[in-house]
Amino acid sequence: MLTSGSQLDETRPATGPLCKIAIVGFGTVGRAVAQLLYARAGQHSLELTHICNRNVERKKAAWVPHQVCWTDSIDEVLKSDVAVVVELIGGLNPAHDLVRRALQSGKSVVTANKQLIARHGTELIELARESQQHLAFGACVAGGVPVLSGLHEGLGGDRLLKLRGILNGTCNYILTRIESGALFADALEEAKQAGFAEADATDDIDGYDARAKLVVLARVGLNAEVIPEKVLCRSIREIGPVDFESAHELGCTIRQVSRAELRDGQLFAAVEPALVPLASPLASVSGGQNLIISTGEYGGETVFAGHGAGGNPTAVAVVSDLLHIVRYRGSGVAEPDRPAATRYEVSGDFEAPHYLRFVVKDSPGIIAALAGVLSRQHINIDAVLQKPGYNKSALPFVITLEACRTSRAEAALAEMRGFPFLVQQPFRMPILR
């Protein structure tokens, strides 16, 4: 049975039988989940009975009641009488095997594992149905923001057509620092020192983390089944202060934007840096915050925003999923099934205005040469921006294009890359409206 999380609300003290749960993975989020459960003891019917982790001795915490069983054996958890397994180990293996085995053994599962749900969600949702158990994954996207439950339940009466959002706090932090004048390498190091980025931040910077979240959002909000590798993913590594200067002249800023849109029987999806108008809600997102905008056929736009990372916000989503499961189990009513997701052809070929940034060795005829390429691709120039004061041997300037397909803009760039006056390869971003 599919659940996608619900916001934690005040509940009455438990009067029925306790629902026994096990936490597998006692890192930052696992500890925060346990602490939240104990902080709200008496207000729910959840009982933590097992904590499972590798090298479990070094994870033991004095504040956990003595009756809780600490173990490094997943088999011990699965053979126990726990009703719900909370999977917080991350990654695909052994998480995939653990979740499958838990469902098959008659236990419901709560997970915060976005990669697992992005790649195996359809299979695991079906297995949960067959096993008459619950699979809840509200913490997979946007941490403490109840976006999945909002899309699944709150907007269930609408037909959603489009999702856009900022889904990765690391990228958002780095871009905010570059906007203040920092170079990419320095902003990345600051993000690591501040705890926003892992030692290897590749998944964040190159868009793979946000892509997994977008796939989950598309599954829940658009009822679309998507293979992650089919979604266009572009890095923020090439963005510098000069790009923000030009973006500001255009009344925009730059964010890593994830978007998915159903149109003409096809799913368009991409994760990439983009110019967004300063008046857009996307422009105001700072630090580790996340924001998602859904567009419905009947209800129009709905915005979900809040803290998308960290132990406590994610723990709120996990405990909310647990309470959701308890409510259904206690009522004896099965959750309604969702229709099977539709497998769409996925394209990143959006139509939008585009920003092209060039760095050249100044010489006569550069604009004419570039304009000739654009003309051959039937692309109209909107504006040319050039700020004074730069060295003529590495002169940056920007050309903005009228709305055209991404494929046409990329074809033009491919031809331009052979020009001898280029000091750096040209860089493209869509301009969202």
Image (cartoon, grey):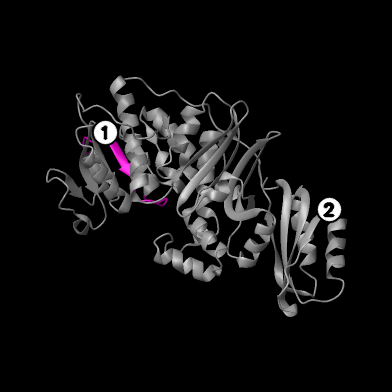
Secondary structure beneath label 1:
loop
Could you give the CA–CA distance between mark 1 and mark 2, rounded to whole angstroms?
A: 61 Å
- Using residue 177 as the reference point, say whether residue 366 is left or right of it: right
Say if the magenta span includes residue 84.
yes
Which of the two discs, 1 and 2, sits closer to the camera?
2
Q: Amino acid at mark 1?
A: Ala
User: Could you classify mark 1 by the number of other residues whose Cα lies within 10 Å: few (under 14), some (14-19), or many (20 or more)?
Assistant: many
Q: Between residues 433 and 319, which one lies in front from this camera angle?
A: 433
Range covered by the magenta-colored residues: 80-94
Name which residue lies at 51% across and 56% down.
172
Residue linked to disc 1: 83
Q: Amino acid at mark 2?
A: Asn
Residue 380, numbered label: 2
Which SS type dominates the magenta stretch?
loop
Q: Earlier in the sequence, mark 1 or mark 2?
A: 1
Q: Between residues 302 and 22, which one lies in front from this camera angle?
A: 302
